[in-house]
Amino acid sequence: MQEFLNCLGTKVFMADDFTDLSYHVGTFGPNTLWVCDTNTSRMVRPLPTPNVVIEAGESSKSFTCLEKIISVAMDNNLGRDCTFIALGGGMICDITAFAASIYMRGCRVILIPTTLISMASSALGGKTSINFRFAKDIVGTFFPANEVLICTDCLKSLPNKDYMNGFADILKHSLLTKDDTLFNLVATRKQQIMDRDPDTLKAIITISLQIKKSYIDNDPYERLGLRAALNLGSTFAHALEGMSRLQWSSGQAVAWGVCKAMEASRELGICTSEFAAGVIKLFAFYGFDVNYRIQRGDWMDFRNQIAKNKQSVNGVSSFVLLKDQGEYEIRPVDEEIIKSVVMVPSV
Ligand SMILES: NC(=O)c1ccc[n+]([C@@H]2O[C@H](COP(=O)([O-])OP(=O)(O)OC[C@H]3O[C@@H](n4cnc5c(N)ncnc54)[C@H](O)[C@@H]3O)[C@@H](O)[C@H]2O)c1
């Protein structure tokens, strides 16, 4: 197990394989609470106790499941010196870290991400959350994990749609740096990426996390307009997820949202048509739905979802727009431009 990154005090380790991960996990000792979902609970047999297994799926990122985690911790008399261990994707990591951040005013938390998005992005950076009233991540804290343990062997059992969800964030990160390394990898190694080649995965996960770290280190609480760049596509994506009552998965929505941000950037003259087209082509190359448009009758719902967005300044929603690779601008966008890029055109 190699430590390869430290961000906001989180030590990030890469395991050689599942055996290496199991060995490290075996050193945790008692005084832990394991949290998994109904799929990831099958990855460790027997599952250490005490544990909480919650139903897989985004709807479990809820107050009800949060109560369940806190209840099991209390029922087992865990003190503030305990460690919560999340074994799962972004949903499990987000809710477990949130529970750890409020249990006895904060206990240790170790994240073992098991999906591509949680390995390449969400486990790093300390954003914890649950959803409420269909609003994504509306309740949460900043609470960086003590450790993140990445093992690409875990990805072998991940269904393709969940794998591709995570890949959307990697593509997004490749656009947020002037260094071409990640962009070139994703543009040229599609076969290895689709085959889940371990070396390629380790490379893209490592670079993706390094890019994320570069935005987080100097703006951990997203107050200086640096970290906010990582929200490229999110204002559009979260509105779509909210409008669909979370039926759109977050990765598919992010891919769509980044493409909409590119179209808006082009319409505003912030970037060239060629750059916008190139980015959209890259997402389409990996099979993301870049052409989806919302029905005209859904516009008010979509607009209301945008208004609920956390990325707002003085109550006005803002959008991350790209001028070029690694060059961004954060600003409100005129409603007519939003309509023109998201809605089916009138006949
Ligand atoms: N905290 C952050 O900074 C941040 C950033 C981006 C996204 N997120 C959050 O991450 C979540 C999306 O992440 P996700 O796609 O990992 O969702 P998820 O945790 O719901 O996992 C997706 C599905 O894959 C299953 N699964 C997980 N690992 C598996 C494995 N190894 N083998 C087989 N099945 C497995 C899960 O049970 C689930 O059914 C959203 O809630 C999103 O808001 C958080």
Image: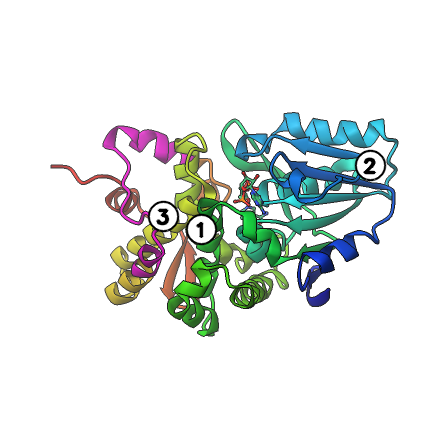
Question: Which residue has dot 1 on it?
Answer: 164
- Please indicate whether residue 158 sits to the left or right of residue 334 in the image: right
Question: CB at mark 2 closer than 8 A to ligand 1?
Answer: no
Q: Which residues are magenta?
A: 281-306
Confirm whether the magenta stretch covers residue 100.
no
Tell me which label, 2 or 3, sits earlier in the chain.
2
Distance (Cα) linking label 3 and label 1: 13 Å
Amino acid on which the number 2 mark rests in the picture: Met
Q: Quick check: 246 left or right of 303?
A: right
- Residue 210, given in percent of the width and then of the height, sits at 58, 66
Q: Which mark is residue 266?
A: none
Do we see residue 306 in this rendering?
Answer: no
Image quarter where the N terminus lies is bottom right
Report the disc number at residue 104: 2
Q: Quadrant of residue 304?
A: top left
Expressed as whole percent of the image width and height from the top left, the position of residue 124 reads 63, 55
322 lies above or below 247:
below
Crowding near the residue tagged with mark 3, few <14, some 14–19, many ≥20 C-alpha atoms within 10 Å: many
Q: Residue at x 24, y 32 (%)?
A: 296
Does the magenta run of residues contain 285? yes
Report how far apart the C-alphas of labels 1 and 2 lie in the structure. 37 Å
Mark 2 crowd level (few <14, some 14–19, many ≥20, 10 Å Cα): some
- Looking at the image, residue 77 sits to the left or right of residue 333; the answer is right
Q: Position of residue 53 (x, y in %)?
A: 68, 32
Residue assigned mark 3: 256
Q: Residues within 10 Å of mark 1 (few under 14, many from 20)?
A: many
Nearer to the camera, 328 or 187 = 187
Q: Quadrant of residue 321?
A: bottom left
Our reading of the magenta stretch's main secondary structure is helix
Q: Nearer the viewer, residue 72 or 161?
A: 161
Q: Residue at x 60, y 60 (%)?
A: 216
Quadrant in which the C terminus appears: top left
